[in-house]
Image (cartoon, grey):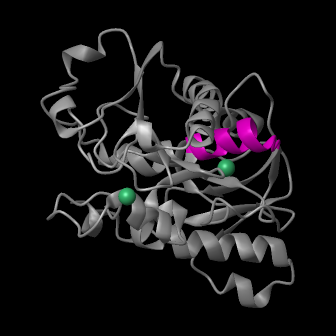
Amino acid sequence: MRYITGGPQEDGCIFCNRLARPNDIESLILHRAEHCFVIMNLYPYNTGHLMIVPNAHVAEIENLDPHVIAELAHLLPPVVRALRRVLGCEGFNIGLNQGAIAGAGVAEHLHQHVVPRWQGDANFMPIIAGTMIIPELIPSTYAKVRAELDAEIHGIARFEVVLLDDADEPNVWLCDDEVPILDSTPESPVWRSAVSSLGLQDAEVVGYSGAPGTMDRVTTPGLVIRTTSVPDGSGWRRLPLFSQYQQSNNRAKTSDTLLRVQNNLAPWIRNDSDNRA
Ligand SMILES: [Zn+2]
Ligand SMILES: [Zn+2]
């Protein structure tokens, strides 16, 4: 599992470090606004624990420009709506911890926590004492929430669905030789729209197939889903995901998408057991 390492503290500020890196999937950044960004917590208190973080490395709220605080507040409604749709949570803890004495884990860079809550979750959620490590859910939750924010914040309604079977060396399902496009419906989360539109009996979201960078407005966003089902409809065929597809096919968009999935998911899907920490 490459998303979480319980290893030694990294040098510098974890927020500034991630903001400076280009690959938002690896950094778990879900959205970049003008003055703030949204990132998943590496050590979540609960599934879907996000943070809204000002870009500026500032420790105290009174030292942030008012328009930065305003943007931070503006990001809350879409973030809360996206989390509720994806996770079906019943409540939220939303808050800023200012100063180490107040419980701030990264006291030098102020950040706002958004923690989804469910009935009864406090029984297993050590919210003050420590964190819950839910590594297997991180890439899945990241993909679902990022797609949902694509819809919420950017108004995107069309998503690619990279459908993989459950073979050890996975195959990708193509429809008429292309990665299928889903038109999402506003009443259900993007990932569930994908699963039901393809008639999948079982499905697991395993990653995000869109651009690594959240500022990319050209690449079609999408989800990588694994299933044991055969998708509904005709025109489907299976090809090995790790084939030389991109060199032998003239459908450039599908080739680009599969190349991104190969690059971003290869270490995780291919060597699942090796990388599981
Ligand atoms: Zn965004
Ligand atoms: Zn910082």
Q: Residue at x 48, y 71 (%)?
A: 21
Q: How many marks?
A: 0
Q: Quadrant of residue 65?
A: top right
Residue stretch in magenta: 144-157
166 relative to 192, above or below: below
Report the side of 128 relative to 273 (left or right): left
Q: Residue at x 77, y 36 (%)?
A: 197
The one of 216 and 142 positioned closer to us in this rendering:
216
The C terminus - image quarter: bottom left
The one of 184 and 132 positioned closer to us in this rendering:
132
Report the side of 9 relative to 186 (left or right): left
The majority secondary structure of the magenta stretch comes to helix
Q: Quadrant of residue 175?
A: bottom right
Q: Ligand 2 quadrant?
A: bottom left
Q: Is residue 137 part of the magenta span, yes or no? A: no
Q: Residue at x 21, y 37 (%)?
A: 131
Residue 73, given in percent of the width and then of the height, sits at 58, 30
Residue 107, given in percent of the width and then of the height, sits at 26, 45
Residue 255, given in percent of the width and then of the height, sits at 75, 77
The N terminus - image quarter: bottom left
